[in-house]
Image: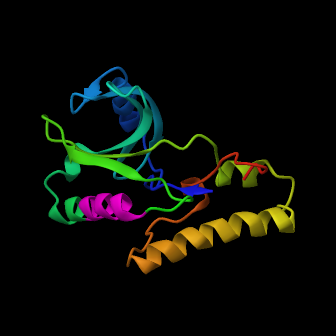
Amino acid sequence: PAMSSIPPSDSNASAESDAASRIGSTVADRYIIEGVLGEGGMGAVYLVQHKSLRKKLALKLLHPEYVRNPTVLARFEREAVAAAHLSHPNVASASDFGRTDDGHFFLVLEYIEGRELREVLTQAQGPLPLARALFITRQILAALVRANELGIVHRDLKPENIMLVKGEGHSD
């Protein structure tokens, strides 16, 4: 699995409509917003396409009310730096970080196409088979070990932030 860092989901209808209203707009003159991937307490995560590279990416945009909160901004920047330096097959990598002309901070991450572990667990009729659960768990632990080696603590590890993707010879 790949771990992403979408913040907790506690969005309301107003935030969702604000997130949806950004579809079609451009961030930092190079990322075209194509859709909403998730909405959380600190911001929204969008599916974007890089204009020049024509590559799909995920872009996390911090809610504007946090721009004046130095604690939140410092945490967001630490997340960006950590994600940029954490290279592991089971972790979504970061490739860009910045501030838009209108003052929004953003973080660009590798787009992971797959299913959330939460969705898989919800659809399962009972617990996952032991071999499958162990296979997924080993990958999560390998990513956490690598993060720990770099002094990084994942502050929001949960099934919604773990994506299961098809790989060579396996579906998790």
Quarter of the picture holding the N terminus: bottom right
Residues drawn in magenta: 75-86
Closer to us: 147 or 27: 147
| Residue at 51% across, 58% down | 91
Above or below for 100 versus 122? above
From this viewpoint, is residue 49 visible? yes
Coordinates of residue 84 in the picture (x, y in percent): 34, 58
Coordinates of residue 76 in the picture (x, y in percent): 28, 59
Would you say residue 136 sits in the magenta stretch? no
| Residue at 74% across, 55% down | 121
| Residue at 43% across, 69% down | 155
| Residue at 15% across, 63% down | 70
Closer to us: 43 or 152: 152
From this viewpoint, is residue 45 visible? no
Would you say residue 80 sits in the magenta stretch? yes
Coordinates of residue 74 in the picture (x, y in percent): 21, 64
Position of 42 with respect to 36 (left or right) is left
Above or below for 110 versus 148? above
Closer to us: 19 or 27: 27
Coordinates of residue 118 in the picture (x, y in percent): 66, 53
Position of 10 with respect to 118 (left or right) is left
Give the number of callouts. 0
Position of 2 with respect to 38 (left or right) is right
